[in-house]
Image (cartoon, grey):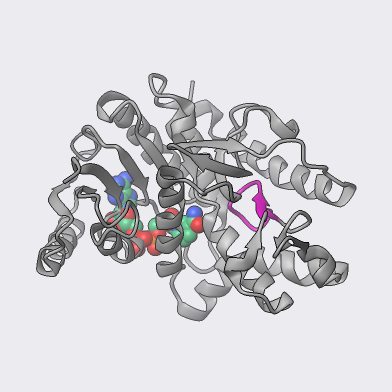
Amino acid sequence: MKQPVRVAVTGAAGQIGYALLFRIASGEMLGKDQPVILQLLELPIEKAQAALKGVIMELEDCAFPLLAGTVATDDPEVAFKDADIALLVGAMPRGPGMERKDLLLKNAEIFTVQGKALNKVASRDVKVLVVGNPANTNAYIAMKSAPDLDPKNFTAMLRLDHNRALSQLSTKAGVAVGEIEKFVVWGNHSPTMYPDYRFATVGGASLKDKINDADWNANDFIPKVGKRGAAIIEARGLSSAASAANAAIDHIHDWVLGTNGKWTTMGIPSDGSYGIPEGVIFGFPVTTENGKYTIIKDLPIDEFSQKAIDKTLAELEEERGGVAHLLG
Ligand code: NAI
């Protein structure tokens, strides 16, 4: 039997947490032969801690063979102790009519504290995925608050946008989701993101040529993917949870176990590729192997795409400006 992997999850008693923990414990994220220890963080308030206790009781009642232990705490330094993987989900979720900017400052403080705690106690190879919104900027704050860890360990979740877009493309082109390769979502996890299927293929043939509908791309597809989160809130009265948890599982699964040469999208600190300033957490096309990701370089960027990339970058720069004073 392999050594257990320590997986920290924040906001563990929230709705994404509830859709996430059971799948991690069943082996869907790291493999059916990989034991896990869940280290769960919730707010130091009675209701949250009681809810977390209830979730752990349910985890126990599943008798997962791969669940080698659980820790419940309200202390980030306990939750992140020796963590190999940290899923930073806990944040204030956006309710109907709430602006992203309002969320920015409320969440900045949380991710400064958690970045510092990761810096102090987590495994030096910890893989961090920020789900809590605004995800890219929260990941940036955590990364900057953890100077002793490799910045490459900090990522933000664009995978839900990636998956949402794949589903739209599959319906439009009448092909199975799994047949689509070389697709990417550039930029921020927000309505400004740029889902880009110019390089996508189906069975080796161009998906763009197959769809051949520039009007649909600009006026239907891109806005629909960008506003999908708001559409779910409107329909459900709550933000996406099961699909968000699913995307988090996909992100970590692929990061740890590799994509076998296939592209996926990860929000990662820029290395300067495509003119994105170094350090900005940006959705890029990547492949992954042996626990490391590599950006797909030198893709041609046409005028339409450049404008879209500039727009989402401008938003990220604005968010970054909004929290700069907190980072010293
Ligand atoms: P939720 O409100 O159901 O759960 C959040 C949980 O986090 C609560 O139980 C709360 O007590 C806890 N929490 C808050 N601050 C915390 C802290 N400092 N430390 C530990 N726990 C803390 O929210 P839900 O639906 O689970 O969403 C969580 C976050 O994920 C939200 O910010 C939401 O906007 C974001 N999200 C991101 C997506 C993405 O694609 N990146 C997709 C969907 C949601």
> Above or below — where is 222 with respect to 136?
below
Position of 85 compared to 310: left or right?
A: left
Position of 202 compared to 108: left or right?
A: right
**Image point 28% across, 65% down: which residue?**
18
Measured from the top left, where is residue 66 in percent x and y? 18, 56
Measured from the top left, where is residue 107 in percent x and y? 43, 44
Measured from the top left, where is residue 17 in percent x and y? 31, 60
Regarding residue 227, the answer to whether it shows in the image is no
Queried whether the magenta region covers residue 184, the answer comes back as: yes
> Above or below — where is 74 with respect to 271?
below
Queried whether the magenta region covers residue 271, the answer comes back as: no
> Above or below — where is 216 with respect to 82?
below
Q: Quadrant of residue 177?
A: bottom right
**Image point 49% across, 30% down: which residue?**
152
Regarding residue 30, the answer to whether it shows in the image is yes
Q: Magenta region: which residues?
A: 183-195
Identify which residue, 135 or 215, lies in the foreground: 215
Position of 265 compared to 275: left or right?
A: left
**Image point 53% across, 48% down: which residue?**
260
Measured from the top left, where is residue 198 in percent x and y? 79, 56
Taken as a whole, is the magenta stretch helix, strand or loop? loop
Ligand 1 found in image quarter: bottom left
